[in-house]
Image: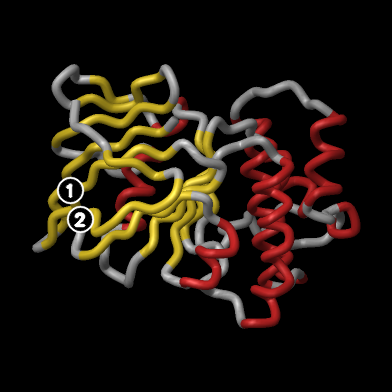
């Protein structure tokens, strides 16, 4: 269970949201500028809220009143951005290994094989990012996040930069990720069809506030 109750002023706007997410995929859904990416960044530890609390299962990640702020690298979040952000000087295999190596995790070849099979990455291992399609790059970025053994996957509009053909290519992999990986996801999107296809809970955002909750998403309480 992810519990979020945070407030943060960003320029002239304020993001103030509270919700609980207990499903496999919880979508943060709303138009551009509604605060979706800012919420993801606060959960990841990339932006520090001014007030509130963030907890994942039994771990408190942020509590303003209790002066708790777990650093981003210790939160065990797998983050996938809109453009993938692969390292251009590394092969696909090197990119996939990066999170594991940086987190000093022992290599698990069985787990690695499952991720490679689930995302169909085996044929890409020797290639460089600049030779990949947009959909292939996103599959590699998701695989890299998974192999860092996260407690939660944070996907910030992972299909937004892709054309319709590449979106159609990668959506089945996201469904497999939802059904097979066993890692809950917080998924940012402004595409209704994408949200309906993937999410079992929805947090609708508008103007930096929660405008509605659906499915496995519940009202949050501040701590």
Residue 11: x %, y % from top left: 13, 60
In which quadrant of the rendered view does residue 103 lie?
A: top right
Relative to 52, is 33 above or below? below
Residue drawn at (26%, 64%) of the image: 34
Instruction: Check the picture and name the quadrant holding the C terminus.
Output: top left
What's the CA distance linking mark 1 and mark 2? 6 Å
In which quadrant of the rendered view does residue 126 lie?
A: bottom right
Relative to 59, is 131 above or below? below
**CA neighbours of label 2 inside 10 A, class few (<14), some (14 to 19), many (20+):** some
**CA neighbours of label 1 inside 10 A, class few (<14), some (14 to 19), many (20+):** many
Name the residue furthest front.
Answer: 215
Residue 109: x %, y % from top left: 86, 30
Q: Which mark is residue 16?
A: 1
Residue drawn at (67%, 45%) of the image: 144
Q: Please give the residue where the numbered disc 2 appears in the rendered image.
A: 209
Q: Is 204 placed left or right of 161 in the picture?
A: left
Instruction: Check the picture and name the quadrant holding the N terminus.
Output: top left
Q: Can residue 139 be seen at all in this image of the molecule?
A: yes
The kind of secondary structure element at disc 1 is strand
The kind of secondary structure element at disc 2 is strand
In which quadrant of the rendered view does residue 98 lie?
A: top right
């Amino acid at each position: 269970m992810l519990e979020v109750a945070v407030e943060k002023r960003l320029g002239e706007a304020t993001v103030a949201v509270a919700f609980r997410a207990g499903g496999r995929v919880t979508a943060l859904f709303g138009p551009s500028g509604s605060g979706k990416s800012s919420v993801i960044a606060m959960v990841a530890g990339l932006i520090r809220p001014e007030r509130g609390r963030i907890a994942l299962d039994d771990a408190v990640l942020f509590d303003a009143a209790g002066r708790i702020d777990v650093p981003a690298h210790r939160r065990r979040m797998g983050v996938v951005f809109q453009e993938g952000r692969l390292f251009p000087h590394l092969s696909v295999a090197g990119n996939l290994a990066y999170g594991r190596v940086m987190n000093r995790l022992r290599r698990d070849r069985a787990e690695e094989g499952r991720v490679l099979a689930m995302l169909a990455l085996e044929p890409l291992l020797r290639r460089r990012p600049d030779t990949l399609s947009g959909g292939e790059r996103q599959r590699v970025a998701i695989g890299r996040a998974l192999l860092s053994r996260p407690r939660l996957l944070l996907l910030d509009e992972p299909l937004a930069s892709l054309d319709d053909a590449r979106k159609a290519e990668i959506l089945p992999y996201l469904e497999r990720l939802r059904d097979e990986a066993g890692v809950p996801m917080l998924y940012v999107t402004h595409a209704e069809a994408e949200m309906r296809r993937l999410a079992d809970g929805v947090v609708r955002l508008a103007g930096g506030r929660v405008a509605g909750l659906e499915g496995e998403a519940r009202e949050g309480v501040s701590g």
